[in-house]
Image: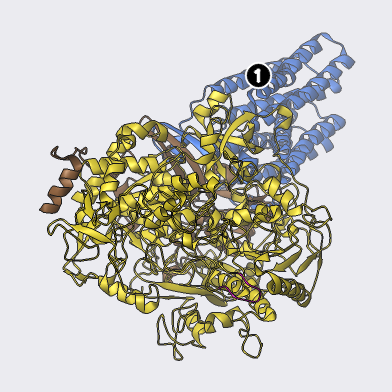
Amino acid sequence: MHPAFSVVFFTTATGAGYGLLALLGVLGGLQVISPDFWLGLIGMGLALGLIVAGLLSSTGHLGRPERAWRAFSQWRSSWLSREGVASVITFIPAGLFGIGWVFLGRTGGWVAIAGLLASIGAVVTVCTTGMIYASLKPIAQWHSRFTLPGYLIFSAMTGSVLLNALLQGFALGSKTVLATCILVTLLGWGWKLATWRYNDRLEIATTANTATGLAGGSVRSLEWPHTEENYLLKEMGFRIARKHSTRLRQITQGLAFALPVLLLAATFALPRPFAAALSLLAAIVQFAGMLVERWLFFAEAKHTVTLYYGR
Amino acid sequence: MTCLPSQSGKKLGLVIDLDTCVGCQACVTACKEWNTGGHMAPLTDIDPYGGHVDGVWFNRVHSYEHTTEMGGRTVNFPRSCLHCETPACVTVCPTGASYKRASDGIVLIDEDKCIGCKLCSWACPYGAREFDTDVGVMKKCTLCVDRIYNDNLAEEDRVPACVAACPTSARHFGDLGDPLSAVSQLVAERGGVDLMPELGYRPTNKYLPPRAHTTRAASVAAPALEPVRAEGGFLGWVDRMLSN
Amino acid sequence: MQGPPRGANSAPSQRPLADTRAPDEGDGVDTSPDVSDSIAKTTCYMCACRCGIDVHIKDGKVRYINGNKDHPVNRGVICGKGSSGIMQHYSPARLKKPLLRTGPRGSGEFREIEWEEAFSIATERLSAIRRTDPKKLAFFTGRDQSQSLTGWWASQFGTPNFAAHGGFCSVNMAAGGLYTIGGSFWEFGEPDWDNTKYFMLFGVAEDHDSNPIKIGLGKLKARGAKVVSINPCRTGYNAIADDWIGIRPGTDGLFVFALIHELLKAGRVDLDYLLRYTNAHVLVIHEPGAADDGLFVRDAHGNPLAWDRVAKTPVSATDAGAKPALTGSFTIGGRHCVPVFQLIADRYLDDSYAPDAVAERCGIAADTIRRIAAELAHVAFKQTIELPIAWTDWAGRRHETIKGRPVSMHAMRGISAHSNGFHTCRAIHLLQVLLGTVDVPGGFRFKPPYPRSAPPGPKPAGKTVKPMTPLDSMPLGFVCGPDDLLVDEAGTPVRIDKAYSWDAPLAAHGLMHTVIRNAWAGDPYRIDTLMMYMSNMAWNSSMNTVETIAMLTDHDGAGNYKIPFIIYSDAYYSETVPFADLVLPDTTYLERHDCISLLDRPISHADGPGDAIRHPVVEPDRDVRPFQSVLIELGARLGLPGFVDEDGSARYRDYADYIVNHERTPGIGPLAGWRGKDGTSTGRGEANPDQLQRYIDNGGFWHHDFADDQRYYKMANRSYLDFAESMGFIPKAEPIVFQLYSEPLQRFRLAARGHGPVLPPKGDRQRIETYMDPLPFWYTPFEEAVVDLEKYPLHALTQRPMHMYHSWGSQNAWLRQITSQNRLFVHHQTAAGLGLVDDDWVWIESINGRVKGQIKLIDGVNESTVWTWNAIGKRRGSWGLKDDAAESNRGFLLNHIIGDQTSADVNGKRYSNSDPVTGQAAWFDLRVRIVKCAAEEAGFTEPQFERFQQPPHFEPSPDKLTFGAEFRRAREATE
């Protein structure tokens, strides 16, 4: 699949944003994190900012963005529509929570309920995003049991690492949060490795034989219906060389997982300004790593239509 | 509405005979020609005279070499929308632009509702949908919905353009939901198959496999030739034959 | 449905729904949009097949084009090209106005001129030529469908230098057939699709009669008949064959002789058929050294004789009551003679034609050859069919049924485009005739006006060329011996293309492919003006493109072009237009009148004759004129006889007027339908002023259906022959005798042996002796015979993609999307041996040069063969294509490396790279090697040529096409 930047950024940014929102909603609403105007403003601003930036970026992928509002109508069948609905609905409790927790400095009561609802909304939205991909049968690398948990884990991972950076910045860092970040990042790493392992060994039942109905033997593409690349090939015929894929997987592991774990581990031992700086660096590096991961998520996904082209 | 109709009255579709298709591209351009002025007009062509020409087409013909232990064969393979019974391209659509008609099973796009998110083309395993970058909407085969019921065409012309054009009679059209229809019987008789049945989209269109190496293959049970009876050899035989 | 379903695609599974009322879906879809304001029925010209089309016009524009269901050629179907006619009609490469060259030839620098200036330039020039030496005008008309006009024009002008493109297309098929059975494959005959049980398809066949053949293949598939293809390439029609015989190029003749060998050996030939319809029993003089050796024994009236084996006397070969011998050796009047059939048996029973002897050379297992022979015999003799229809033969014998041997064959350019193609084509006809399958149920059938006598009557004109004097007949015809050749006393050719000379005696279609070289070299003489129509001679229609371009632009010492003046007419800015001095812009096929005449290449099928017209369905939006009308006006301005009335005024207003009112012989004109003042005559009759309208009312064509008893055995069918005479197809209702042994060829041989008044130059005698063999034989194609096969181990072929017609398709925005770059297809094994993989760039090298292209690996090809799609490669600046178009950057033209001449013979003479009998261009003799190119050479084709300038007022081609949006807007505006 063509790794369009608009979609790569969209899923990465909203994943992080919803992760952060979910954590702030629960921890803030339940006063695990005490209300603090600047912390709240920056935290909620970052979460919602990432979400809004991601959603805006996703409309860049649309042919007719002015009609984007129509996407809320088909929630009964479409994960994309559900995502749209969930993302918008989530803004309501998130907004209320923001008002209560950031501007009014309140916790508990309706603010806690709003925070919890925002958390739930964030989780649901990330689920719907994951399901957009997980539901696509023509793309075996996506249509697997790894996709949805992956989206949730990476959302939790990037959200928590962001939260840690935020807390460290306000000198509110805790070893529990740090440890959690490291654990979730290690979990994400493991999940990614397992996903790749699964994908690399995938035996896809759909072949050039079943695609053409020609049973047995080999089916080899002789001539395409067109000599230049068309929409199908540009959108779904993306190919990545094994060499590049291996390199990018290494970069993903370094940036998204290994380096953040090292930086976070170092944070344990360092005083505040350095801890905050390393935590921020961990979040930034991880975000960059996740962009690479998401680029690979698309680039390594093989659509069945490529079978018709012998790719 | 992108929920699928609970049942469709008819299952209109195409049957494509891979045993007969010579890959002449007649169906391809007949489709382009009708449809670029038809229901989804236009089928935009970008850079039509340049090095990166890229147009919207609803029907494309590939060619393959199919090699089995019994030998090789070149197969020409037309590919277009299969008007599936459970088309994910419809259910994934967030706006209701993509839909399956309850009355005849044709999968269509309501262009006015399409936001151009392209998800339907991702959901279609067959590559049946092509995006018109100029208009910003997805386009696809309409099964010539503006021909098959068209009062402004002579009744005999109310078939999809590709079926009317096909010079080798490799394309057939009808109600595949009716087991008694001519197309259904053709499929039964020729062992028509679904493409990618394992994905469960339940395509309406069927493909008739090449008859090579099947019991349908034409064979001539000819005994080996023997030289004519020895006396005088062939010329003696000629003389004997003429004397009879 | 009203009435029975019409058209080819009318199976129950191809009809409209039982109820075509739109269901009440409620989705707002307009299921009954208005389609067209009017439908014009005319004739397609996206290739040479002449299908009937319905052009739907909406708001003055072409909305769409579909096949005419009533039309005898295509019966409602339409090919990939036909449906793309819109894009051809609106092509950005259309010429807009007459052009006069201003820059150097080949630059593309022109200025626009008015038609009056164009006419006066042409008239002045041609008039001077006509007054002095008419043959200094060479008029060659390419893919012309109006040869009965253009040939007649040349004849009235007085130049013998006329031909169309047949010499580089398919004259081997035409001549091979016409000299043997009085008809031919090509598009002048067809298999009996409804009855045949075994169909053999030889060679590239997609390029003529394509929709009829495709419709036919569909029928064979539906009926379960067996299809056997003999072709190095397994594409197109060959892909759906039950048996693909991947033969080595140029060896089809050997394969066929091996089949004949097997059939003869097994006694599986139809002796009765041979005696009735062929010259198998005719006696051939066997007196080596005599002046009449190898000619037929004839009686005092010139009738060939046979030997009555019962009466033991000579007897007229056409004596229906005789019992002729087919074998033996006889003495008549002291002279030895043998029946033709004895010669056939002697030759083909020889072990050199046994399957085992030819298998390796053909690349076909001997067992396969034996199996095919057995299958042919089985179907022909054990699966005979009989139609319960009584008929009467030429001798008055009544037959209660029509018997058929259901084996049919078709062959085209794969056979003809070799230097041994004439004899190979004759070999295939010999095989058909031995099996008794010509014009019988289930066999190969003639399309009227064929069969004609083998060969047909008219001889080529041009023996005397005089100023201001028309030729005494048409420039093209059929020679029967050296006396008919167009050579002077020294043996020098009369014609600029050397047709009907010792170089190419049976050149029934001329040799357009030699004209530029000969005119440049002044061999046999210099010409003044080369006038051409619709043929891309500076690119894909010439061999040896690089040198051809150099010849077109070459100067003599005084700074004059060696070819002094070039007039060219085309509708589009092709690679040839920039080489013209005067350009006459033609219309598209939807803007013109044409006639698809029985005098030329009609639309008949085996069940009846037909002809058709084109008529303007849209008005030109440019200052262009149909070439035929221009030619008629030019004829009038020159005062050519037949083009002016006695008072010197133009006889015909334009081509349409000519089509209706011209009579070639009294009562016979370009169109056969609705003749006579009231339109009630058919075939013969006075001109009918209303004729074109009658055609238009009938869907653009006329067709006559035979009575049941006229449909088969046309070569000997009394009722058919009478009809053919009444229509003027044949001069007299006499049987057509298949010439298995061709006496005309033997006459040339005798001349080579020094007999007769017209003798070949000494240097040509061995060649004439060898190739003018009266019985078909096989020889190694010329290039293969001379090149180092170790060095050039591969055959290289081209095929025309079914969706393209020569160079035309690349200007078509739709068709070029399908193929804008051609690859060289290489067998996997061959590639593996050379260390090549898919997508590699390679040099393709021949003795004539090298060209660079990208490869694609393939299994379905003869291992010693590589091939590519023809005419995809284009020159930058032509056809309205942008500079970055794949056609001029990645596509390649194999023509660059095909030599236009043979290697020098022992006398240092180089002949055209053509069949020595007919002059057919030997495109497919090419031998190559392929070499992986250096890394820095990959990605672009070579050789490259300078970009052409664009003519004045040519707008850049658009960056986007939204054709059809306007129809939708109009529909939605009226809703």
Q: Magenta stretch: residue C13 in it?
A: no
Residue C385, percent from left and from top? 21, 57
Q: Quadrant of residue B222?
A: top left
Residue C115, percent from left and from top? 75, 75
For the stretch drawn in magenta, the main secondary structure is loop
Q: Quadrant of residue C718?
A: bottom left
Q: How many marks?
A: 1
Farthest residue, direction top: A269
Chain coloured yellow here: C
Q: Quadrant of residue C143?
A: bottom right
Q: C751 above or below C631?
A: above
Q: Residue at x 37, y 43 (%)?
A: B210
Does residue C185 appear to the left or right of C475 in the view shown? Answer: left
Observer able to see residue C118: yes
Q: Residues within 10 Å of mark 1 (few under 14, many from 20)?
A: many
Chain coloured brown here: B
Residue C152, percent from left and from top? 56, 73
Residue B29, percent from left and from top? 55, 57
User: According to the image, what is the colour scheme of the structure?
Assistant: by chain
Does residue C812 appear to the left or right of C338 in the view shown? Answer: right
> Which residues are the magenta region?
C465-471
Of residues C875 and C564, the one drawn nearer to the viewer in this rendering: C564
Q: C595 above or below A267?
A: below
Looking at the rendered image, the quarter that the N terminus of chain C falls into is bottom left
Residue type at the position of mark 1 = Trp
Say which element carries label 1: helix
Q: Residue at x 76, y 76 (%)?
A: C120
Q: Which residue is mark 1?
A: A189
Chain coloured blue here: A
